[in-house]
Image (spheres, helix red, strand yellow):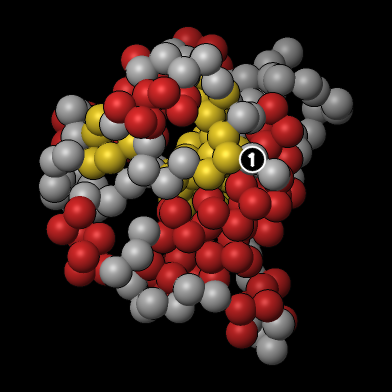
Amino acid sequence: MGAAGLTAGAFSRVTFLEDPVCDGCGAAFEHDGGAFAEVRCAACVAKPHAFARARAACVYDDASRMMILRLKHGDQQQFAPLFARWLERAAAPLLTDCDAVAPVPLHRLRLLSRRFNQAAEIARPLAKAANRQFLPDAVIRTVRTASQGGKSARGRRLNVKSAFTVTPAGARAVHGRRVLLVDDVLTTGATAEACAGVLLNAGARAVDLAVVARVRAARTLPT
């Protein structure tokens, strides 16, 4: 058994994302066109996200989903430091540039039922390893939204619209600073967009995004 109780077989089934990836959304490019710096896919060029850059450690598939759900709903918190180590590598440029690390928050009622916020449990050791300030309560979720599962991209955006706010203390902590937002999974980006938006409105200089896994999306390298 390896880290977090994983067998070698379980670990080998994880599809880790390697460069080149889109600097804007973290999706893998279909082929390696050589050494590219800060290259963005056509979708990110046409419609930039509220977050400046994104990185994901791996593809969200059956292998990674099992691990994430064991943390999220199975109370197996040994996966949090493992995921943080994955992000130390995958999001290294973002960690180098950021001033502080903040998790995507849960609503207080969901936090009571789950007992912990999986994004915060990943972000805490990540911030410590990078010697960056950890801001667990800078952003709060003021609306208990329905699950994003099964919703369209537009439905996801509407579901989290106005769901987040930055606390007064959080606004002071992020003002003029570059914040690394951390979450477990990136699907359409609606939740990350909403969180990044309120951080920017509160005075953050920029917001980047690091997630453990993202849905599979291939991008074509620009010519």
Asked whether 218 or 108 is in front, the reply is 108
Residue 60 lies, in percent from the top left, at: 49, 55
Q: Is residue 175 above or below residue 89?
A: above
Left or right: residue 146 versus residue 121 is left
Instruction: Find the residue positioned furthest to the bottom.
Output: 1
Which residue sits at x=57%, y=34%? Answer: 100
Which residue sits at x=46%, y=66%? Answer: 68
Residue 10 lies, in percent from the top left, at: 62, 78
Could you say whether the residue bearing mark 1 is in a helix, strand or loop? loop
Amino acid on which the number 1 mark rests in the picture: Arg
Residue 40 lies, in percent from the top left, at: 62, 20
Q: Is residue 25 above or below residue 9?
A: above
Q: Is residue 184 visible?
A: yes
Q: Is residue 216 visible?
A: no
Quarter of image, res 21: top right
**Quadrant of the drawing holding the N terminus:** bottom right
- The residue pinned by badge 1 equals 132
**Quadrant of the drawing holding the C terminus:** top right
**Dot 1, how many residues are within 10 Å of its Cα: few (below 14), some (14-19), or many (20+)?**
some
Asked whether 98 or 4 is in front, the reply is 98
Left or right: residue 79 versus residue 167 is right
Left or right: residue 163 versus residue 133 is left
